[in-house]
Image (cartoon, rainbow, N blue to C red):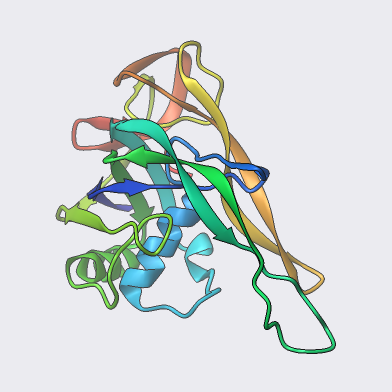
Amino acid sequence: MKGLVFDIEVLYFSTFRKPNSTSLILTYTIPPFTTIRGMIANALGLQRDDYSLQDTIKIGIAVKKFGFKNTEMAKILKLKENKNRPIRNYPSSPMFREYVVNPEYTVFLGSDEYTINKIFNALKFPERPLYLGQSDDLVDVTVYSPNEIQEVEIDIVDSVIDEIVQGAIIEKIPYKFIEEEGKYNVEYKLVSIPSILPLRLSSTKKLYRYLDKNIQIQ
């Protein structure tokens, strides 16, 4: 399998909104898998709601720098659906929004050689400006040359992992979109986000070796 590694620096701040938050807009600690795929799709110039990357790439995530969480008062526009006439009214209400200041992440991809090379070139020369979260949350991406990756069974991990680990941040984050009866629902994954890497596990696990890093890609 071919692997690709790139670093993401959020230049200012970003919000990865938790969909079940209402009066207070909360953010995930890390960008969800769906958000990362969306950024890559933007670099490739894919159309909105093109979810083809779900079936072609696997993703691993590591926190390079957590940044810090803060809140602001934001004016949020709400859409009122009306089947009989076009929407003309956009009611708004103030609410607190949580955001992460200047975080940095490392993303690990795994796929076939053609797909990895295509994404590598797209990240170096993106079709559209790259952002993570909201469209104003611009990022700086540093992409490294693709390499071969090998599956290993080891008890040391250098990334987010899909099991509960003591001392880590536990979050249930969006993983992929599933189409059911013409509508898209979200599949979630429960992950542990280690505060310090590398992390020693209680038992060995099948991971992928990226140079000197052991990464779980999902």
Q: Nearer the viewer, residue 198 or 93?
A: 93
What residue sits 65% from the left and 43% below the top?
A: 23
User: Left of 123 or right of it: where is 42?
Assistant: right
Residue 85: percent from left, percent from top? 79, 89
Q: Is residue 147 visible?
A: yes
Q: Is residue 32 visible?
A: no
The image shows residue 169, relative to residue 116, as above or below, that is: above
- How many circles with numbers are drawn on the protein? 0
Q: Nearer the viewer, residue 193 or 26?
A: 26
What residue sits 67% from the left and 45% below the top?
A: 22
The image shows residue 198, relative to residue 212, as above or below, that is: above
The image shows residue 185, relative to residue 44, as above or below, that is: above
User: Left of 1 or right of it: where is 53?
Assistant: right
What residue sits 82% from the left and 71% below the top?
A: 181
In the image as oriented, which residue stretches furthest toward the bottom?
Answer: 85
Residue 101: percent from left, percent from top? 31, 39
The image shows residue 84, relative to residue 12, as above or below, that is: below
In the image as oriented, which residue stretches furthest toward the right?
Answer: 84
What residue sits 18% from the left and 72% below the top?
A: 125
Residue 39: percent from left, percent from top? 38, 62
Q: Nearer the viewer, residue 27 or 208?
A: 27
Residue 173: percent from left, percent from top? 56, 41
